[in-house]
Amino acid sequence: MTIATTDRRRIELAGIDIELALHGEGRPLLLLSSEEQLEQDLPLIADLARRHQVIVPSAPGFGRSDRPDWISNPDDIAYLYLELLDKLDLQGIAAIGFSLGGWIATEMATKNPAVFSKLALVSAYGIKFGGPYDVDIQDMWTSHPDKVAAWKWHDADKGKRDFLSMDDDALGIVARNTESFARFCWDPYMHNPKLKRRLHRIKAPTLVIWGENDGLTSPVYGKAYADLIPGARFESIAAAGHYPHIEQPDAFGKILHPFLD
C-alpha cells in the first residue's frame, strides 16, 4: 500500500541520523510505531494522513536509523524524540504510540508535560505492577514464536507476515528491529522501574486503548496503566489482541478519531 508522503528524510539528532517520514497535511500528529514496524500499520497511517500531517520517526536501531552505543533504553529514546520535536519547532501536538512506541510516548509526556495536547496509548509497555516473580508482560524472547503469535493476535492469520516475498533489505530491517527491541527492553524486562511513579505528571488528555484478547499485555494491565494517568480514559476492543488497529480497524477508528478531533 502506498501513502501520499510529503517528505521522507534523514534528520540529525544528538549526532546521529534518524529516519523520518511525514505523511499528509494538516494538524501535526506524532505517531510512534510498535517495535515491529508492521506493514499492516499502513492503512491506519493513510487514514490519519487525511486529517493530519503524520510524523513517523524510526527509533534508533529500528528501520534505517543509526543505533549509537549510548542509546540503551526507551528513556534515552524519549529524550531524543523530545529533541526531534524541538528541532521541528513542534510543541503541544497530538501523539499516538503503539506498544514500544506507547512506552516511549509515555516517557516523553512525563518529562515534558506540555509536549502533547492529546495522547493516545495503544497496548503500551513500560510499567511493572506485580512483584519480581509476577508476569505482567509475557516472555517474548524465550517462548516459541507460535506461542508469541497466539498471545499477540485474536486472529493469528491477520498477524502473518510474508517473509518469503521480502527482499534482503526488508528482512535485514526485521532482524535489526528484533535485535534493537531486545537490547533496549530486556533488562529490566519491558519496563522502567521509575516510570510508574512519574505518570501523575502527564497533563494531556489521554486515551488508553487495548484489545480484549491481548495475551501479551492483558486488559487488566492496560486498565491499571490508565488508572495511574490523571483523567485518562480506558477503552477495550472486542475480538482484538495486541494490535487492535489491525484486527478491528473500524472499531478502533470510531474510538480514536473523535478523540483526536
Image (spheres, helix red, strand yellow):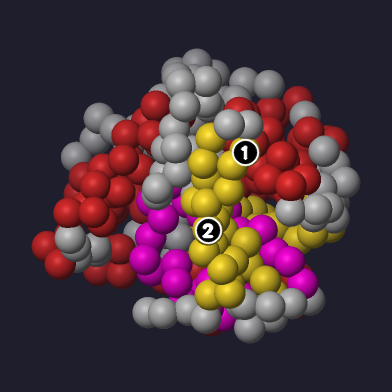
User: In the image, what residue occupies the spot 61% across and 28% down?
Assistant: 76
196 displayed left or right of 98: right
Q: Label 2 belongs to which residue?
A: 9
Question: Looking at this view, is 91 or 240 the one in front?
Answer: 91
| SS for callout 1 | strand
Dot 1, how many residues are within 10 Å of its Cα: few (below 14), some (14-19), or many (20+)?
Answer: few
180 displayed left or right of 112: left
- The reply to whether dot 2 and dot 1 touch (C-beta < 8 Å) is no
User: In the image, what residue occupies the spot 38% across and 60% down?
Assistant: 38
Does 34 lie within the magenta span? yes
Q: Label 1 belongs to which residue?
A: 13
Q: Quadrant of the N terminus?
A: bottom left
Question: Looking at this view, is 184 or 82 the one in front?
Answer: 82
161 displayed left or right of 88: left
User: In the image, what residue occupies the spot 74% across and 47% down?
Assistant: 87
Residue 31 image point, x, y percent: 60, 59
User: In the image, what residue occupies the spot 24% across and 63% down?
Assistant: 161
Residue 61 quadrant? top left
Residue type highlighted by circle 2: Arg
Does 33 lie within the magenta span? yes
Q: Quadrant of the C terminus?
A: bottom right
